[in-house]
Amino acid sequence: MTKEEKQKVDEIVMKTFTLAFELGTNLDELHRMVRELRYSTDDKDLQSALINLEHAFFMTAQSLNILKEQTRNTLFPLKKAHKCEE
């Protein structure tokens, strides 16, 4: 791995983790608001729609977790390259 490749991967990993953290934080807040609304309403149609929305939030959170995991997996070649340089 060249020095330029290593720097580029470092930059991508940093940006990805930052994005995933920010999205996760915003997602959690919106999910909390949707859940509060679902518990506070007596409208069965609205409750049903909000349950579906909560499911979509859950699926998005799962996708973010996969993104973070795969980003962490990208660090292994970087560590390997660093050890080889020593």
Image (cartoon, helix red, strand yellow):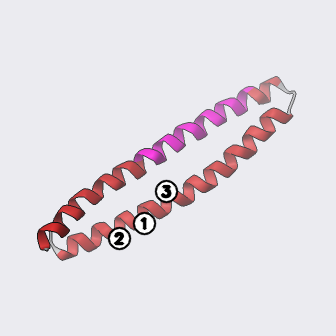
Check disc 1 and give the amino acid type: Lys
Check disc 2 and give the amino acid type: Glu
- Examine the image and state in which quarter residue 42 appears: top right
Which disc is residue 72 wearing? none
Front residue of this view, candidates 56 and 81: 81
Q: Residue at x 35, y 55 (%)?
A: 71
Q: Which residue is mark 2?
A: 11
Label 1, secondary structure: give it.
helix
In the rendered structure, are the residues bearing label 1 and label 2 in contact, judged by CB atoms less than 8 Å apart? yes
Residue 8 sits above or below residue 26 on the image: below
Give the position of the N terminus as an image quadrant. Answer: bottom left
As drawn, is 20 to the left or to the right of 3? right
Q: Which residue is mark 3?
A: 20
x%, y% of residue 12? 35, 65
Q: Which residue is mark 1?
A: 15
In the rendered structure, are the residues bearing label 3 and label 2 in contact, judged by CB atoms less than 8 Å apart? no
Label 2, secondary structure: give it.
helix
Residue 63 sits inside the magenta stretch: yes
x%, y% of residue 76? 25, 57
Check disc 3 and give the amino acid type: Ala
What range is drawn magenta here?
A: 48-66
As drawn, is 61 to the left or to the right of 50? left
Spot the residue most to the top: 44
Residue 38 sits above or below residue 28 on the image: above
Residue 51 sits inside the magenta stretch: yes
Q: Earlier in the sequence, mark 3 or mark 1?
A: 1
Q: Residue at x 13, y 74 (%)?
A: 86
As drawn, is 15 to the left or to the right of 43? left
What secondary structure predominates along the stretch shown in magenta?
A: helix
